[in-house]
Image: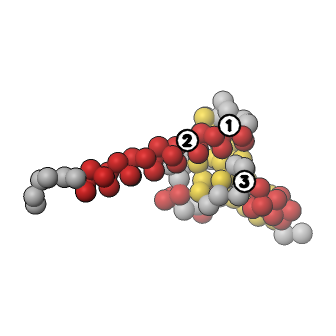
């Protein structure tokens, strides 16, 4: 059976919200990888952990949160809240730009 190795160096840094730190490599089986791919569409999957935080894979992005929270449902809620705040900020920026009276 093939095994997958999750390496922090191999991750797309643009998908992360901050520095990676010193996460160790993690080896998973093909079955674990297949399960993670299916689950991550609806619920965050724990990828790696170091002494301070966890890396979670949700949808197509990787997020880090303190290792004090272990519940994927809570992590999903935190990620969703962050995405909603970002979208509201974007919409506000567009509205501000539309109504800006300053001529450049």
Residue 24: tell me if it is visible.
no
Real-space Cα separation, disc 2 to disc 3, in angstroms: 15 Å
Total marks in image: 3
Residue 39, position in %: x, y?
77, 55
Residue at 27% across / 50% down in the picture? 96
The residue furthest front is: 99
Q: Which of marks 2 and 3 is nearer the N terminus?
A: 3
The residue at which mark 1 appears reads as 74
Q: Is residue 10 left or right of residue 46?
A: left
* Above or below, 66 relative to 44: above
Q: Earlier in the sequence, mark 1 or mark 2?
A: 1
Label annotation for residue 42: 3
Real-space Cα separation, disc 1 to disc 2, in angstroms: 11 Å
Labels 1, 2: front one: 2
Q: Which of marks 1 and 3 is nearer the N terminus?
A: 3
Residue 101: tell me if it is visible.
yes
Residue 24, position in %: x, y?
66, 49
Closer-to-camera residue (52/17): 17
Real-space Cα separation, disc 1 to disc 3, in angstroms: 13 Å
* Above or below, 53 relative to 1: above
Q: Is residue 82 left or right of residue 96?
A: right
Colour style of the rendered protein structure: secondary structure
Q: Residues within 10 Å of mark 1 (few under 14, many from 20)?
A: few
Q: What element carries label 1?
A: helix
Residue 92, position in %: x, y?
35, 48
Label annotation for residue 91: none
Q: What element carries label 3?
A: loop
Q: Is mark 2 on a helix, strand or loop?
A: helix
* Above or below, 37 relative to 100: below
Q: In which quarter of the image is the C terminus?
A: bottom left
The residue at which mark 2 appears reads as 81
């Amino acid at each position: 059976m093939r095994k997958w190795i999750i390496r922090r160096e191999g991750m797309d840094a643009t998908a992360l919200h901050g520095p990676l730190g010193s996460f160790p490599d993690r080896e998973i089986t093909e079955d674990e990888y297949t399960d993670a791919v299916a689950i991550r569409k609806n619920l965050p999957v724990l990828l790696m952990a170091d002494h301070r935080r966890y890396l979670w894979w949700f949808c197509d992005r990787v997020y880090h949160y303190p290792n004090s929270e272990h519940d994927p449902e809570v992590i999903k809620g935190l990620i969703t809240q962050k995405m909603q705040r970002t979208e509201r900020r974007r919409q506000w920026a567009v509205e501000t730009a539309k109504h800006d009276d300053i001529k450049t």
